[in-house]
Image (tube, rainbow, N blue to C red):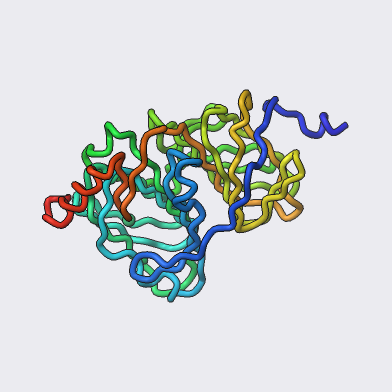
Amino acid sequence: MTAALHATTIATPRQVERLIQGVATREGAGVNLTRLLTRDLQRRLDPFLMLDAFASDAAEDYIAGFPDHPHRGFETITYMLEGRMRHRDSAGHEGLLEAGGVQWMTAGRGVIHSELPEQQEGRMEGFQLWLNLPGRDKMRDPWYRDIPAAEIPLVESPGVQVRVIAGERHGVAGAMQRDVTQPLYLDVQLAPGADFEQALPDTHNAFLYVYRGGVRFDSGCLVGSGRMAILANTPGSDGLRFTAAEEGARLILVAGQPLNEPIAQYGPFVMNTEGELLQAVRDFQAGTFA
Ligand code: MN
């Protein structure tokens, strides 16, 4: 009977390899957030370099924002669930990030930008994910796109609503694609007890973060609210499957093809070698950075 209740297209689903609690972190001019993808996980979760979650009703947690600071060598992807944040950068891009919207910024050879709250009170909640660039693209021109909520495809099935920020679900292309790392970035909303499946190549590194409710895997592993789960790269697996808890669930699911290149990081610069990092610092200090 169980098989009939769980009709599936995924034959060999991945299970949870490890649960991550995250680390309370203060960033920017004094923003309180939770760092979920920390530096010790960069190799395991290649091509992703960082994931921060921010969620607060208290202005003092976010109001200082992120005044002018540099980036080189990767992309920052900011997804707002609630609140408003204004972006300005040295390449001349400016945008207002609003609830349900995504900002996708390619730092490339360098930008100096600010990310500042455009609200004095109320809730601010969302995520910033760092996606690495392949070595050949690290010094490309900066690039920027604001993606308002209405431009993010929604894929619905009974009990399951999925916003496809990047990659593809059930043949629907997401708002963004990247050829080398093939990132998948889904925001998933599940009704109580709803089953969720997603096809995924076994070579992709994958993780999810539950921000409301919880989900349970076939193995019995429960991923509760505020937990990130790293998914095993089981050889021959064709995707993943889990079921929402009684209270339903909201989560982000992120996956990508690893670059398998050396990772050299100094703060907001992520290159392949120490020499390239030194050059980034020199360029920034010399004012020729951006
Ligand atoms: Mn930034």
Q: In this view, does 233 lie to the left or right of 25?
A: right
Q: Is residue 220 above or below residue 201?
A: below
Q: Residue 86's spot in the image, x, y percent? A: 32, 60
Q: Is residue 273 left or right of residue 40?
A: left
Q: Which of 91 and 25 is in front in this view?
A: 25
Q: Residue 53's spot in the image, x, y percent? A: 49, 58
Q: Which of 2 and 289 is in front in this view?
A: 289
Q: Quadrant of residue 46?
A: top left
Q: Which quarter holds ligand 1?
A: bottom left
Determine the residue positioned at 58% across, 51% down. 228
Determine the residue positioned at 50% across, 61% down. 34
Whether residue 148 is visible: no
Determine the residue positioned at 57% across, 28% down. 202
Q: In this view, does 33 lie above or below 263?
A: below
Determine the residue positioned at 69% across, 48% down. 215
Q: Is residue 262 left or right of residue 276?
A: right
